[in-house]
Structure formats: structure tokens, C-alpha cells
Amino acid sequence: MERQTFAEQLLLAPERCEAELARARQTYRPGLGSFQWEELGAAFEAGGEQLRVLGEVRPCKDASLDAEFIVHLAFRGSVNQENLATNLQAQLVPLSLGACEGMVHRGFQDAYLALRPRLLERLRCVGRSALVRATGHSLGGALAMLACYDLATSRGLRCECVTWGAPRVGDAACGALLQQLRLARFVNRFDVVPRLPASQEDEADQGYLQQQLSSLLGVHQQRLGASGYVHPCPALELDASAAAAVLHWANAGRSVLQSLAKIRATNSHVDRASVAAGEVLKNADALFPHRMDAYERNLRLRLRGPSALLRVVKDFFTSCAAIPSIALHMLFPPLLMPVSWFMAGASVKERRPADLGKKGVFLDRAATQPQRRGVNLGGWLLLEAGPSAPLNPGRCEWDFMELLRKQQALDVLHRHRETFLCREDFAAIRKMGLNAVRIPFGYWIVTGPTHGDPYEGPALELLDRAVQWAKDFGLEVLLDLHGCPGGESGSAPCGRKNRGWTWKSWRIPETLHALEVVARRYCDQPHVTGLAVCNEPSRLIPGEVLANYYDKAVSLIRACGMSAERVTVVLPVFQRSVPEFAETWQRISGGRHENFCFDVHYYHCFEDEWNRKTLAEHLRAVEENREELQRFPAVVGEWSLALGGRAQTELPSQQAMGLFARQQLAAYASASHGFFFWNWRDSAGVAWDFRNCFQQGLLAGPGAERLSSTTIDLPEISRSLRFCGFGLIPWQFTAKLSGNCALRPGFSFPFYIGCQLAPAPRL
């Protein structure tokens, strides 16, 4: 009987296989996840976070492994231009690791050598009895192979390596060295990256796709000195089944239909060329699936069989935008109707927020008082570009204040503070149906600047005025210490954009003093019902350090007279896993605190992964946020209607934002302590400006009745269907949204839009 490969053995242990993929996925996400530490590196002089490896060392509890410790390493793939430059440095150069035999990809070796000193230092105390398990996707897989070979030869460690869509690393001699490792290579059948650099000599991969790549790139690679690459072992194709192949081509066909509709609907020839160029890249991703979600889908399909197939099919129909939905319903309505009803009936189980300690630790506001439905007053007492308009502070308030002091023009700041907000703003906020405001401010507003910071303060009289206006109009106030002494991060929202920031720069004792001043000053104000102890703390701050600070802050605030019966202490969880931080918080605090909640910020536009998501994927992510809000006491401290680039082009902007708004409102109704839109005013656009959103009916307001009974007009769909040969005459497809509604993942036959309509709360 033929001996099983390591990859085939892994498939027989589904939990292990899925855990390896989850570790590779975590490298693309903020925070450490289940890992203990991270190391960053730079292969080029530009510096920055070009390379990333996550790691952990834990005692081995499995006696069959014959190891004292298990070391888990996960290397991140390509996410920036520097990584692309690394991939393109494909010349074969002598291997400088281990036996120094064979030739290796120059870019991959340079990248690993940039990480190597810090990695070896992390593993300095690990003995030979340890077992190393490394994983990575794409570029990360190549680095994982080199790391395992290095640790096996230089430290004598046993190593296992699992890669996902990894490219070739070196020539045949290098491959022979890597064969000494326990190596499992997983690929998607139509993924191009594992076939690069192209090679005709590699017997492990001689399929049709490889032959075409070799004929296309072979001559150019020879000129660059990049020929002769081979894989160290054969790959296991995750999507080798007929069902996976059908789903692949269905996804590709859906993407092509969407692109044709978009191009066809573009009027100008110049614009049409620009749109077509962007659509080529999108379709390349569908035809040659290399992203992590494609590997997750195919692995699930391979491991779980029929049950996973149903889920994948449902995801496919859910993510279908209007074109495929209409086309499928027109072609197969009798077949799809029962599927529609089945999927439309799917719902998320309602769950109570987790009890994180003794009785009373979570006070259910919904049972005692209305949920906070509010807006941020950002840009006033801490300057930020956009919210502070018409004042333009540039990069951050720190730089702006240095400029004002140099020019002796502090009156510009004083005039901004006096005129930015007035009593009429609070009246308008209440009239628009909101019941709360979140007021961000810097520590210098409370104590004045310290340690030579260039800020201007104190200015507590301004905060007093805002609290009084809120009281006059029946608005609750969440005071938000948005900028701490030294900064809780090195980003502009805390007051200073500082590349040299480290978590030890944060002056925690001074921060606690500022909180004490605020708590004592407003402890008797009945409309001040929340106090946030910082804003968006960096993920580089160790979880235990942050939880210890929160523990001291809550105790101090309670001692200053802000009782748990009336005031919620807000603890930000930013770029971290909420469940994991909740465990750390429970361990540190011992469950002795009452009426606290976590502050989460749900934005869908900043990280690059949001730019690649479809509108349906954004809506599905909102549903995942709903599930998180149902598990933990939380306030959504910031959210907006800004969408990633790809989702913005699938529907007209107004319609996309309207659907996105209603989905978020429905989800955030699950937030135990409410939600606050960012921002009251903002020059960055409608998606960030509550006043404009209200006027256009995106968040209730004068246009809400119009939007709630609006029709989604998609004439470009009919044109695309005719263009694709369906023979339909041009017509206007409309889908009526009855009432104030939101979208849930599902497939609702009567509406043809790939989503289920559900009631949503109005502001």
C-alpha cells in the first residue's frame, strides 16, 4: 500500500488541520489571537511592518509527540508593496542557511534573514526536546519552510511545516534539503501562486496551468536567472472534488456577469476603460483563487463533506449580487424557490451577554432604561482632520499646536473651541431622535498639558457647558478620554501621530489622575451616565497591562463617587479579540466590578481586506458583529457608513449606504449599552456626517419614509443580461423595500437581491 503523505495524514485529523489554517489566518488580523508574541521585520530600508511572524511556546500535553514543548509559528503573506517587491526578486542565489547547499529565491531568503535574529532570540531558551510547528499562506508559507529548515539544522529541533498556497522556494538541491522536514503543501487547483516562479523541470506539478505559465514566463525567468525551481514535495489539492470545481466556475461566472453589467452601465468610453481595468483584477481573483477565504472554504468542503457543501452553496447565493440572482431565478425559479424559503428561514440564535463575574456585573440597560442611540462630537476638544473642519489640523493636534505656538496664533484654536458647537446643535441632536452624545476630549482639557506637550489647556469650562446643554435637552453623556498622557497609541486619534511610540510611552499614573478629576467633577451630574477610560489602545499593549489599567481605573472611578447604579465605565477593546480579552479581564479583575462594558469600533473601510469585500460580505460581517454584541456587554463607540472600495461600486452609492445603514442599525440594537455614530459633522463625506445622513434619509430623517418604500433601480442588469445573450428586452428591475428594513444573510425569492429583508429599528 502506498505510504500516506504528511498532508494526507493531516486531513485525517480535521481539528489539527483547521487549527493550522486558523493560525495562518491570524497573521493577517490585528492582535495576537491565541499566540503569545509577535515579531516584525523589514526586508527593505523603508522599514515599517513589512514582515510579521506570530509565535507561542506551550508545554506539550500529548505524550505521543515525545516533546516537552510545542512551538507554534505563523508567518504572514503579502499585504504591501514591499512584500510584492520581495516576491519579484526571483533570482536564484546560494542558500546561506544550514548546509548552504542549493539555490534559493533571493527575495524569500532576504525576508527570512530580516526576521531571523529576533526569531532565534525568542526561541533561545527552547531545548532540542521541543517540536516546532510552522505555517503560513503565500509568502508566509515560503518563509515557514525556510524557518523550519533553519531551526532543524542550526538548533537541532524537530519541525513540521504546513503551507497554504505557497510558491516555489528553490531549485532541486534546495528541495532535497527541505524534504528532510515533515512538510504538507495545500493548494487550490486553480491558484496561480503555487505555480510560481514558473518551472518546466518540476515533476511535482505538470498540469495544464503550469504548462501555460512556463510558456509565458519561461524565457523572461531565464534572463533573470530564475529558472530551475522545483517544489520539495507534491501538493494536495483541496478542491479536487467535482462539487468544488462546479462552485469554482459558478463563482467565476457570477463575477464575470457582475463585471459585464458594471462595464455596460458605464456611459463614458474613458470611464468604461477604467472600470474594465478594475474588473479584470477582480475576476482574476475569482478565476485563480488565492485568498485565505478560498482556502478556508475548500478545506471546509474537503473535511466536512455534505454539510459543508450546503453552507458553501448558501454562502454562494448569499453573496450573489443582483445579476446572478435575477438570472438564476429567471432560469430556474421552480428549483430555487424551496432553496429560497429554506435559506430565508435561517436566523441567528439570540444569546444573552456573557456574565463576566459576580451577580450584577452586567446591568441590562434595556430592562431599566432606553438604549443609548447617540452621535460623537469629535473634532472639538481633540482635533482631527475631517471632524474639525473647517479647521484643518493636518496630521494631528500635536503638530498643529506646535505650528500655532510658533506663529503665536493660539486665538485660532480658542475661536474653534468657542464656535464649533453651540446650544442649537444639542437641540438638533435631540430633535433628530437621538438620546445621547459621546464627547471625546484630550487629557489636556482636564489637567492642562504635562511633560512639555504643546497642547493648550485646561478648558473644563467647555466640557461643563456641553454637559449642561445635554441636560437641558434630555441627552445622556458618555465622556470619552480620547487622548491620554503619552498616548495610548501612536496614532493621530489620541492627539499625536508618533512613529517612535511604544506602549511604555503611555503615562498611566497621569491618565488615572485625569480620570479622577473628571469623575469627581461630574459624579453628581445625572445625565453623565458613562466614562470611557481611553480610546483605541494599541494592540501592542500587552493584554495583562491593559486589563490591570482598566481594573485600577474602574476602582478609582467608583471611589470618586460615580456609582455602578448610574454610571457605566467603558473599557475599549480595539484591534483585539473580544472573547480573548474578556478572559484576560475576568482573570485580572476577579469579577468584582459592576456596570462596565467593552467599547468596540466597527469600521468597514480602513484595512485592505475591506476593500476586497463585496457588499454582501460587508453585510455578513455586520451579522457577525451582532453575534459578538449578543455575547458581551458592549457599546459600539464608533461606526459609520463608509464602505470598502469594491462594495461602493456594486450599487449606486446612496442605495449601498442605505442598505448598509439599516443592517447596522438592526445589528447594533443588540449592543447592551448602545451605539454612537461617528461623527456629528465631518468633511470626509456623507458616510461620516450624521447631519447629512439624516437629511438624505440614510439614518431616519426627512428622507427615511422615501427610502423605506424606495425601489432599487438596476437597469444595467437588464442590459447585461441582453448583452450576455439572454435575449431580454431592456426593462427596469425594481425591488421594493417594505418598511424600515435591513438585510440579513439569506436568500429571499420575492426580492431577487440575494438577501433576506428584516425589520430594523429606527433612530
Image (spheres, rainbow, N blue to C red):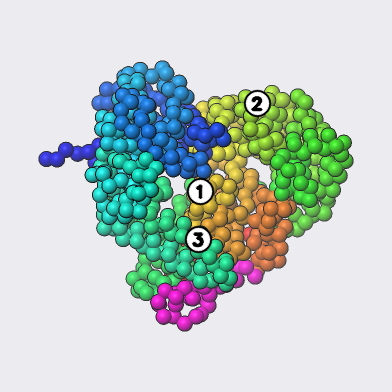
Work out whether mark 1 precedes mark 2 in sequence or the reverse, and give the earlier one. Answer: 2
Tell whether position 32 is magenta: no
Residue 519 location, quadrant: top right
Q: Earlier in the sequence, mark 3 or mark 1?
A: 3
Q: Farthest residue to the bottom: give it.
A: 729
Q: Which of marks 3 and 2 is nearer the N terminus?
A: 3
Label 3, label 1: how many angstroms apart (C-alpha)?
20 Å
Q: What residue type is labelled 2?
A: Ser
Q: Position of residue 131 (x, y in %)?
A: 32, 25
The Cα atoms of the two marked residues, 3 and 2, are separated by 45 Å
Vertical placement of residue 732 versus 110, above or below: below
614 over 132 or under it: above or below: below
Q: In which quarter of the image is residue 497?
A: top right
In the picture, the disc for residue 475 is none
Q: What element carries label 3?
A: helix
The x, y position of residue 298, in whole percent, is 34, 50
Residue holding disc 3: 277
Q: Quadrant of the N terminus?
A: top left
Which of labels 3 and 2 is toward the front? 3
Q: How crowded is mark 2: few (under 14 residues within 10 Å), some or many (20 or more)?
A: some
Residue type highlighted by circle 1: Glu
**Disc number for residue 505:** 2
* Position of residue 3 in the picture relative to residue 245 (left or right): left
Of 229 and 635, nearer the camera is: 229
Label 3 or label 1, whichever lies nearer to me, is: 3
Task: State the residue position of label 1.
Answer: 609
Closer to the camera in the image, 419 or 557? 419
